[in-house]
Image (cartoon, rainbow, N blue to C red):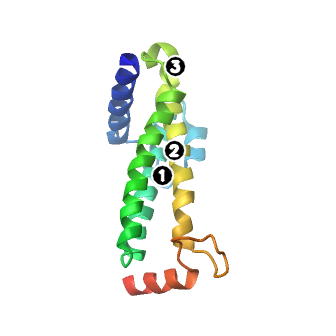
Amino acid sequence: MKAQNHMWILGSCLLNLWLSLPVSAADGEDVTQCLQHAQTQQALNSCQIRDLKQADAELNRIYALLHKVYQDDPEFLAKLKHSQRIWIKLRDADMAMHFPAEDTAQHYGSVFPMCYSTVLTELTLQRIAYLKLWLEGIEEGDVCSGSVKRPAQIRDALEKLK
C-alpha cells in the first residue's frame, strides 16, 4: 500500500510537471503531424503532452459551458461537481493501475511521459464525449433522458449567453 501511495504522489508530481512544460510543436500542428515530425523521444513526449493539454483545456471548456447552460438547475450542477470530483479520483486510480511500478524510469523507460500522457488523454477524451451529451441534448420522447435537456432548450440557453 505504501508503494502505491508513493506512485500516486509521483504520478501527480509528474503530471503537474508535464502540464507546466512548454511544448515545441508548432501551434497549428495536430498531434499526428507532431509525432510524424518528432526526431527524439523528448519530442515525442512533447507531442503527447501537448495533446493532453489540449484535451484538458477542452474538458475545462465543456465543464464551464455546462455550468452556463444548466445554471437554472442547481441540483444538477451540484451533482455534476460531485461527479467530476469522483471521475478525477477514478481517472487517477486508473492511471496508477495502468502504470503501477514505483520506479517509472526503470520499468517504463524514457517513453513513460509519452505513454502516460497518451493514456491520460484517452481517459480525458472519453469524459469529454460523455459530458457532451448534456450539451447536445436528447430529443423529446426518450424516457430515460434524466437531467439532459432537449436540444431546443440548450440552443435557447446558449442564445441567452450571447
Pick whichever of labels 3 and 1 is earlier in the sequence: 1
In the structure shown, which secondary structural element does the residue marked by tag 3 occupy? Answer: helix
Q: In the current view of this chain or complex, which residue is farthest to the top?
A: 106
Which residue is at the front of the view, 63 or 147? 147
In the structure shown, which secondary structural element does the residue marked by tag 2 occupy? Answer: helix
On screen, residue 131 above or below 51: below
Residue bearing mark 1: 55
Is 8 placed left or right of 141 in the picture?
left
Which residue is at the front of the view, 69 or 117? 69
> Given the image, on which type of amino acid does mark 2 rest?
Thr
> Given the image, on which type of amino acid does mark 3 rest?
Tyr
Q: Quadrant for the C terminus, please.
A: bottom left
Q: Which mark is residue 108?
A: 3
Q: Residues within 10 Å of mark 2 (few under 14, many from 20)?
A: many
Pick whichever of labels 2 and 3 is earlier in the sequence: 3
Report, in whole angstroms, how far the alpha carbon at label 3 lies from the one at label 1.
24 Å
Q: State the image coordinates of residue 113 (x, y, percent, origin top left).
A: 46, 30
Residue bearing mark 2: 121
Pick whichever of labels 1 and 2 is earlier in the sequence: 1
Q: Are marks 1 and 2 in contact (CB under 8 Å)?
A: yes
> At 50% from the left edge and 80% from the top edge, which residue is drawn?
154
Report, in whole angstroms, how far the alpha carbon at label 2 lies from the one at label 3.
18 Å
Q: State the image coordinates of residue 64 (x, y, percent, origin top left).
A: 38, 65
> At 42% from the left edge and 17% from the top edge, which residue is drawn?
102
Q: Residues within 10 Å of mark 1 (few under 14, many from 20)?
A: many
Is 90 placed left or right of 64 in the picture?
right
Image quadrant in which you'd find residue 73? bottom left
